[in-house]
Image: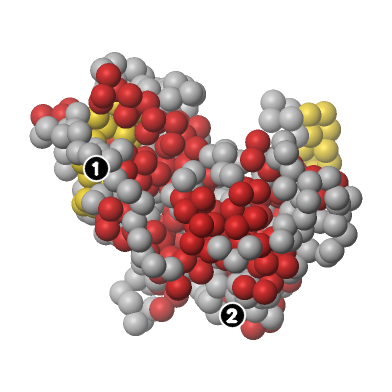
Amino acid sequence: MAAASGKLKKNPRVAMPEQEAKVRARNFLEVPTGYTMKMAQEEAERCLQCKKPGCVAGCPVSVDIPGFIDLIAHGDMTGAMRNLWAKNALPAVCGRVCPQEIQCEGKCIVGRKGEPVAIGNLERFCADYERENGTGELPPRGDSTGKKVAVVGSGPSGLTVAGDLIVKGHDVTIFEAFHKPGGVLVYGIPEFRLPKDIVAQEVNFLERQGVKVECNAVVGRTVSVDELFEQGFDAVYIGVGAGLPRFMNIPGENLVGILSANEYLTRANLMKAYEYPKVDTPIPIGKNVVVLGAGNVAMDSARTAMRLGAESVKVVYRRSREEMPARGAEIHHAEEEGIELFLLTNPTQYLGDENGRLTGMECLKMELGEPDDSGRRRPVAIEGSEFELDCDLCIVAVGSGANPLLTSETPDMKLNRWGNVEADEKNGKTTKPGVWAGGDIVTGAATVILAMGAGRAAADSIDDYLKLGW
């Protein structure tokens, strides 16, 4: 039974079993191996069942966290899953990739005097248990409204919109540019962090509810937003992400051996290049690899390079460890797997040989000055601190911009100065009537759960529009 409110239990957090670091560093199998039922119930009993749960306030989609945890503690896994689905269409995904330490778990009262309740691990366990042992029962669907909605992009934002609107009785079609649905969940996040079978099963769950998925459909090229309305759609949701690579714009950037993280991870994840030549997609295998950046994408790239056979992998970041935007778990796993962090280091130019191939880079040591617009302390170069790093492969993971394929073909939809779609923060409405947008195409690169939160808000607004009018 879950702990009574106000009685702080000092039981230690139940660690989720993992592959041993030296073993997993050379395979693409998922790193954590999951809770048993006994482990999950033991961890669930650490929850205080707070009357004013901070964890719910910290969740962008307001999952009833104490509710589903209490149901796990009592062994009601069907009830726990129904509770989760009421707010979160992708619990198996969120349990694996959400930054719980700065969201739900960061607000957990238990964490004030110890380790917070492992909310992410319990969410993952609940979703995995349902997939392996559940009844397969679908949520109830409302009566058909006769209205049709086009969802452009099948990432976390688009999947959330589709899942919410299908149960409200609307006809929903997802248009995906790639040959597999899932968006960033399949092209951006590696197999060892989010197995693609799990994403496929989440999409299949939506298809079983009636959502139609059309792949190889590049809205903005094969069909325009206006043509979607001409085809009979009553509303359009745009969730195409932020897939435009950014580079450092420093000398030597055209040398062979420098890739964007977008291309590198898409080859490895969506195209399964790590199985080459069993699959047709090649991928460069570096001996000495450097990854620029320190977010989750950088960690994913570094850990992928290690698994592909690199002898050394270094992450180069111009700020300190405290400013690294990656999840704490990803940084911890990377270091366990032998990846080195070169912090307070900034590359100034790439070095190459007579054949135009990358051989290294010149870097400067940095120190932290006053905070900049992001609130983080600004890195300042230390004069005379130049040094060289050897590398034959560099993966650039310093952020991404708005994909212009769709937006450039929709001139009556207002963009901001960065090329992102301007949309109402509360409901996702754009300046184009009948069109909503959310996720990274609006906010810039952010988290899966924030994209899902935007999708949920937009779905409610679209539902009101279809039933009541603009």
Q: Is residue 239 left or right of residue 398?
A: left
Circle on res. 212: none
Binning the other alpha carbons within 10 Å of mark 1 as few (below 14), some (14 to 19) or many (20 upward) gives many
Residue positioned 83% across, 65% down in the render: 12
Q: Is residue 466 left or right of residue 352?
A: left
Which residue is disc 2 drawn over? 26
Residue 23 versus residue 433 in the image, above or below: below
- In the rendered image, residue 286, in percent from the top left (x then y), is placed at 55, 71
Binning the other alpha carbons within 10 Å of mark 2 as few (below 14), some (14 to 19) or many (20 upward) gives some
Give 379 or 253, whichever is nearer the viewer: 379
Residue positioned 31% across, 74% down in the render: 280
Which residue is disc 1 drawn over? 172
Which residue type carries mark 1? Val
Residue 11 versus residue 37 in the image, above or below: above
- Whether residue 227 is visible here, answered yes or no, is no
Residue positioned 72% across, 36% down in the render: 52
Q: Quadrant of residue 382?
A: top right
- Whether residue 94 is visible here, answered yes or no, is yes
- In the rendered image, residue 421, in percent from the top left (x then y), is placed at 40, 27
First-in-chain label (1 vs 2): 2
Which residue type carries mark 2? Arg
- In the rendered image, residue 463, in percent from the top left (x then y), is placed at 32, 29
